[in-house]
Amino acid sequence: MLHYIKTGSTTFDSNKIFFIFSNLNPYAAMSDTLLPELNAISFLQMFITQSVKLAGQYNSERGTANHIQDLGLTASSYLEAHARRQLGLPGKISPEQYVSIITHIKKQIGGSFSQVPSGSAGCVCVENFRCPFGERVKEAPELCRTTASVFGGIAARNFGYAKVVLNKRIATDDGKCEVTIYTDREAAQIEEGDEYLNEGGMIVSRSAIAEVAARVSERMARTWNPKDVSGQKRGLDRPELIAESEVMREALQAVELVAPTSANVLINGETGVGKEVIARAIHALSDRNTQKFVAVNCGAIPESLLESALFGHEKGAFTGAHELRRGFFERADGGTLFLDEIDSLPLLSQANLLRVLQEGEFERVGGAQVLHSNVRIITASNRPLLDLVAQGRFRKDLYYRLNVVTIRISPLRERREDITALVNYLLKQIAHRYDKFPKVLSNEAWQQIMAYEWPGNVRELENVLERAFLFSSGQIITKVGLDVSPDGSVSADQGNLRGKKRLAASQIETKTLQDALVKHNGNVTAVANEIGISRRAVHQKLKHYNIDAGVFRKR
């Protein structure tokens, strides 16, 4: 997706925006932590963060992230000209002078950027310990894209090409910002980030996130929202992909790679992260997309009925079997069968499923006729299947049949960039569902949303928003009923629990990485394949936990 910047490309309904700002709860603004001191900086921080949310709610055709990128790219030329004049740099600049320009800009607007060793040629690296947007950046982590687009725009104007990689961010609780800017296209090939190119004096941005999300969304729209006989499209009834974060982009890249193949896919992730949406995306991008997609929650079917549900039964096979019933495998013939909560399958059903995968055949319960299966299997689990294999609760041979390709969907707390877009999308869905006018969140409600950990992930977010929508009398939702303190921060008890959970998760993740490094002799690529994440993600985790992969390599 090539993205050209032009003046006046963003339009808003001014009446709606005035209504929102004029009707926000004035008492929420009296909190000491909301605006401790009203001055030019705090006003702009508040104004920009609220504008980001309004952009997503009232101009969603191109997405919040693209609007933010527009702002950064448009401003980058003016900011560069200002910095050049102050630093006395009128002509062609070197990479070192480029660093001087971008750090000068950030320091003047309230940041604390400085250069750090990059470790490789063809790039520069800067870090920052104070965000110009203050603590409010945690309410709108998408604002980090302004830094990326300002840095990328300036670099592309001077060197012809740039790729900006946001390694660490204050907005996502990393404690600091660390940004690497590549000006050498070849050196940047293995890195994931947004690209900026100078094409005849016009800066063109290529967002890796936007590109992959747009491609997958377009295919899903064609599969689940085709035109009906009257030529009019149905409403908001198709599964929607929200992918503003790096981790979701990686998941969608895996979807694009595996969908055209016949490989079995195992989707891992906590309850409520959206595993079925990913399964539907795989189906939409496959050559089976004109056939049926059948989703089955294995955990919701009583064990006594599971065989019948999956494989069907003959008339009279058991008490109550008054007629022949076709199972899910028959109903999905030629298409895709999505088996959610595969970890809940009893061992007998696991054996029968293994036979279908190996031989492509099965029988209905009470029947003798061998039926053949032409179904692509996608499975999902919210528990690590290897742990169940070790406990003897899941067949090892079935695990390796299912786990040809693994796609991990991160929990919502690890992809906070997606929250704003998800909220805006879900509020529109809820309004459509109840045939009501759309509603928006107040500043206080946004603070609660962004401070919460979301243990129930997207499903919990939707439930919270639906309840708040129904119980809100006006167009502004002022409370969302979350266990956070009035200033929007998590309560003390919840904060302590969060810290304990993070510590436990860090210890488990560290041990998992170390065990995998030992097993694969320090080979990071092999570790990435085993864990089911990208090679770059493994390097980031090793850096985060201060683990040296070289130590695990045999000399």
Image (cartoon, rainbow, N blue to C red):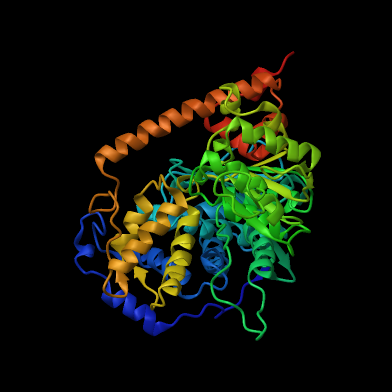
Q: Which quadrant, please, contains the C terminus? A: top right
Q: Which residue is drawn at 26% across and 38% down?
A: 493
Q: Residue 528 at x, y = what percent?
A: 67, 34
Which of the two residues, 87 or 148, is positioned nearer the viewer here?
Answer: 148
Which of the two residues, 155 or 448, is positioned nearer the viewer here?
Answer: 448
Left or right side of 276 for 417: left
Left or right side of 82 for 3: right
Q: Which residue is drawn at 44% across and 82% down?
A: 13
Can residue 94 be seen here? no
Q: Residue 100 at x, y = what percent?
A: 56, 51
Q: Which residue is drawn at 65% across and 35% down?
A: 119
Can residue 329 be seen here? yes
How many labels, in total?
0
Vertical order, 172 against 221 (above or below): above
Q: Quadrant of residue 495?
A: top left
Vertical order, 19 against 554 (above or below): below
Q: Residue furthest top?
A: 555
Q: Residue at x 54, y 81 (%)?
A: 8
Left or right side of 56 for 28: left
Q: Residue 22 at x, y = what percent?
A: 28, 77
Q: Residue 318 at x, y = what percent?
A: 59, 43
Which of the two residues, 261 or 102, is positioned nearer the viewer here?
Answer: 261
Which of the two residues, 161 or 107, is positioned nearer the viewer here?
Answer: 161
Q: Which quadrant, please, contains the N terminus? A: bottom right
